[in-house]
Image (tube, helix red, strand yellow):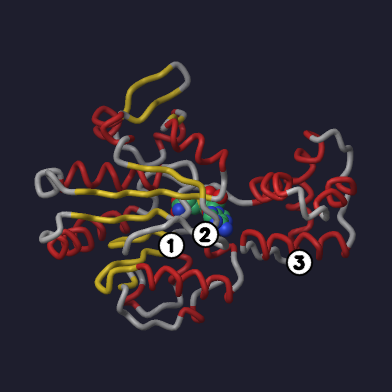
Amino acid sequence: MTLTADQFEFLRHLLDQQIGMSLEADQQLFVTHRLLPVARRHGWNDLDSLLAQLRDPRDNRLVQEVSEALVTHETSFFRDAHYYDELSDHVLPRLIARRTPERRLTIWCAACSTGQEAYSVAMLLRERFAEQLRGWNIELLATDLSSRALEQARAGQYSDVEVRRGISDCRLTQHFHREPNGWRIDDHVKQMVRFQQANLIGGWPQLPLQDLVLLRNVLIYMSPSTRQSIITRIQKLLHPEGCLMLGSTETSNLPDRNKVCIQGNSPISHRSTAH
Ligand SMILES: C[S@@+](CC[C@H](N)C(=O)[O-])C[C@H]1O[C@@H](n2cnc3c(N)ncnc32)[C@H](O)[C@@H]1O
């Protein structure tokens, strides 16, 4: 079962417009594989009816369902450990020193998937900076397009496999408790993070200037022009000395000084961002 060239072109355009996803010409099979279960949930045996219904501009829910089926939620706790070392040893101490007069820190995890990234930052803040940040206003917002991913993030429930990917025994004892089907993150970490649905290609929540934005492993799925416009929007939202962290594949073409953290006031050519 394959999509016609016209159907595939329609989908490419739709996804680019709606969520900034850039489908490659050779992803037909991947798309078919991901969309068949969506079609079947609606009682359709093939993709023709699904594609026809998608052309109805009023059916936003189906567009959302299709988008959720096609995006990749791959994530893990403390993913790419060297980022967290950099956060812990350099970025956070610098930001905390600068924000000491206001005693306020604003952090946005802008494509948080099922929550592991935001909770990793929250754990780090508690473990390394609890004393310094006592009495501070810490605003840690985590957003994602996917309502299903956010449901798990808000529940803070993870399987054995998910916690084993990045959580040490020590952290497991410190921040999680056992549940029949796996582990749940403790309230002292959960309460530090606020989850909200937001599409990077749409209106964003009203946000104050941000000290730190994590936008990791999502731009790789987007076209160069979409990446450029999102990074430009985020840089406007950063404190001049704030920091934007991209994923390692998203910075491989950038100069060394921008590899881990792009500062709010640092001029870079985003066009060179790797695809
Ligand atoms: C591969 S995960 C990355 C998760 C996490 N940042 C990390 O690095 O582990 C990509 C996430 O981006 C989300 N996403 C994709 N397009 C989006 C968009 N237009 N707006 C908001 N989130 C989006 C997906 O739902 C998915 O959860």
Using the rendered view, name the quadrant where residue 199 is placed: bottom right
Indicate left or right for 249 with 210 as reference: right
Give above or below for 177 relative to 194.
above
Camera-side mark, 1 or 2: 2
Are circles 1 and 2 on residues that touch, CB within 8 Å?
yes
- The residue identified by callout 3 is 25
Judge by depth and name the residue closer to the eye, 139 or 76.
Answer: 139
Judge by depth and name the residue closer to the eye, 207 or 159.
Answer: 207
Are circles 1 and 3 on residues that touch, CB within 8 Å?
no
Q: Which numbered circle lies on residue 247?
A: 1
Give above or below for 227 relative to 68.
below
Note whether ligand 1 is within 8 Å of mark 1.
Answer: yes
Crowd around label 2: few <14 · some 14–19 · many ≥20 (10 Å): many
What SS does tag 1 mark?
A: loop
Q: Which numbered circle lies on residue 218?
A: 2
At label 1, the amino acid type is: Gly
Mark with earlier residue (2, 3): 3
At label 3, the amino acid type is: Ala
Q: CA distance from mark 1 to mark 3?
A: 24 Å
